[in-house]
Image (cartoon, grey):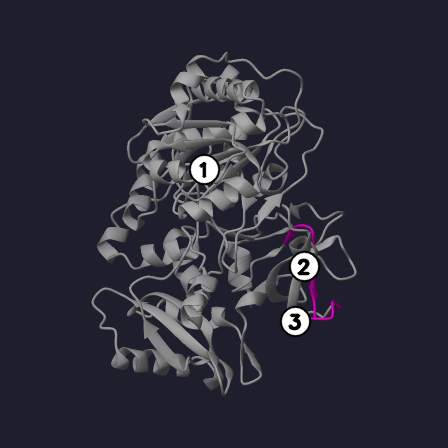
Amino acid sequence: MHPGRIAARTPDKPAVVMSDTGETLTYRRLDERSLRLARVLYDAGLRPGDDVVVLAENDPRCIEVYWAAVGSGLYVTAVDHHLQPGEAAYIVDDCDAAAVITSAAQAATATAIVDATPRVRLRLAFGGAVAGHDDYEAALAAAPAEPVPGNPPRGKDMLYSSGTTGRPKGVKPPLSDKGIDDGPDPLLAVFGPVYGFDADTVYLSPAPLYHAAPLRFAAMVLSVGGTVVVMPRFDAEASLAAIERFRATHSQWVPTMFVRMLKLPDDVRARYDISSLRVAVHAAAPCPVEVKRRMIDWWGPVLHEYYGSTEALGVTMIDSHEWLAHPGSVGRSRLGVLRVCDESGAEVPAGATGLVYFERDVLPFAYHKDATKTVEAQHPTHPNWGTNGDIGHVDADGYLYLTDRRAFTIISGGVNVYPQEIEDALALHPAVLDVAVIGVPDEDLGERVTAVVRAAPGATPGPALATELQDFLGERLSRRKVPRTVDFVDELPRTETGKLRKHVLRARYAR
């Protein structure tokens, strides 16, 4: 339900808390401020189906913008504030944004994109003055805390894919004719019963709110009256401290965060009480088997994994007990029917590898202004089957195992090599802080398997370490999977949810 219903019962209950400063947004304030903002947007001419962009770091006002949009039939697009101005301007213009709400901390980007986004009719800034933008607080203070006229449909997020394989694509779900209080958040029906979201939930979000999962899970928790604790950014030790301080019952992570926490000194890991955690969700990127096994040994059987996407084509889920019986699986389907097909589109038998599809009654989204990309995400003969471009197989019990992204597959000497397997093997080597495996153009092999490694503190990058890592892999993988080349870098291009932007890395090598 809308936070306003919860505010009527528990007005002073914390809805959103910042983990670092303790800044708190109560349900009363969230309801009042989101209603005021919705009226500001309405008075600026925004109507159901229009889009409002939020360009900001993790901040309670991001949640205000979300509920203002959802409560008045608008789309809300959260933009990664780490993007260059040209990248951010592309998204703002592509989504046809009618309003942009930003923070003073993002003033450089916000002002740089003004000329490139002429269709924006309202620009607001909070936390300080930003040239070309009206004051957010003054605008809210002048607006009534009343619902917009009529009974608008429930608004939705329109988010952009993380751009790990190319330019971001806008994922635009259709609006229904139901209002904000005419039914629950559709995702809540899938995740709520499994994870036990309720009014007693204290959900720790260490990831950026401009990504789909943190934003959508925060919305689900708020729709049942729980409390969302937002970290300004991920930090391994600070995350453990936040679990203890706020007695978090639920949290969501990506495997890179697990790796960073596992590499903390033993005395640091033992310093914090994490016994309040009932559910630790992870998603967004594949988790190496050994990493997950060690996390379950440390945190207990509270880990829950799901596989999905911004496109919300389908969802699989698996808990710790199931995973221990099916290590490496991302679970069985909870939304949509799993189909695995070969390159011709024919279904393959259990255990065979192919492209993973979810069958739905209808495709639940379209890529904004890109019919070609939408068609590419559909099965060639079943338009209601959609794919995220992942490769995997389903076992005889219906459990899905992912191999890699189709776009990341390396064809070396005519043989398919899946980088994920190699990256998983290297992830916990003590000398490796981060790694990406890519195919580099090669006249003889077509593509040469190359590992790009960020060395851990104390490790010395160079030929000796490269040989050590190749020997390490040679004991675990077949020879054709061992990288011919190991290069060392200071940083890898990742999103804040841990996804490798491999197209960026491959472009460097192509140059």
Confirm or deny contact between disc 1 and disc 2 (CB under 8 A): no
Q: Kindly report which numbered mark, 3 or 2, lies closer to the viewer in this rendering.
A: 2
Image side of residue 487 versus residue 181, left or right: left
Lower sequence index among marks 3 and 1? 1
Q: Which label is found at residue 351?
A: 3
Badge 2 is on which residue?
376
Residue furthest to the left? 458
User: Residue 241: image x %, image y %?
Assistant: 29, 42
Lower sequence index among marks 1 and 2? 1
Rendered residue at 28%/52% (across/down):
269
Q: Say what secondary structure mark 3 lies in.
A: loop
Lower sequence index among marks 3 and 2? 3
> Would you place residue 486 above or below residue 100 in this image?
below
Q: Residues within 10 Å of mark 1 (few under 14, many from 20)?
A: few
Residue furthest to the right? 381
Image side of residue 357 versus residue 99, left or right: right
Callout 2 amino acid: Glu
Q: Can residue 82 be found in the magenta stretch?
A: no
Q: Can residue 334 be found in the magenta stretch?
A: yes
Q: Quadrant of the C terminus?
A: bottom left
User: Residue 191: image x %, image y %?
Assistant: 58, 42
Rendered residue at 53%/51% (across/down):
168
Callout 3 amino acid: Gly
Confirm or deny contact between disc 3 and disc 1 (CB under 8 A): no
Q: Find the distance from the CA under tag 1 to the CA under tag 2.
A: 33 Å
Extent of the magenta region: 333-346
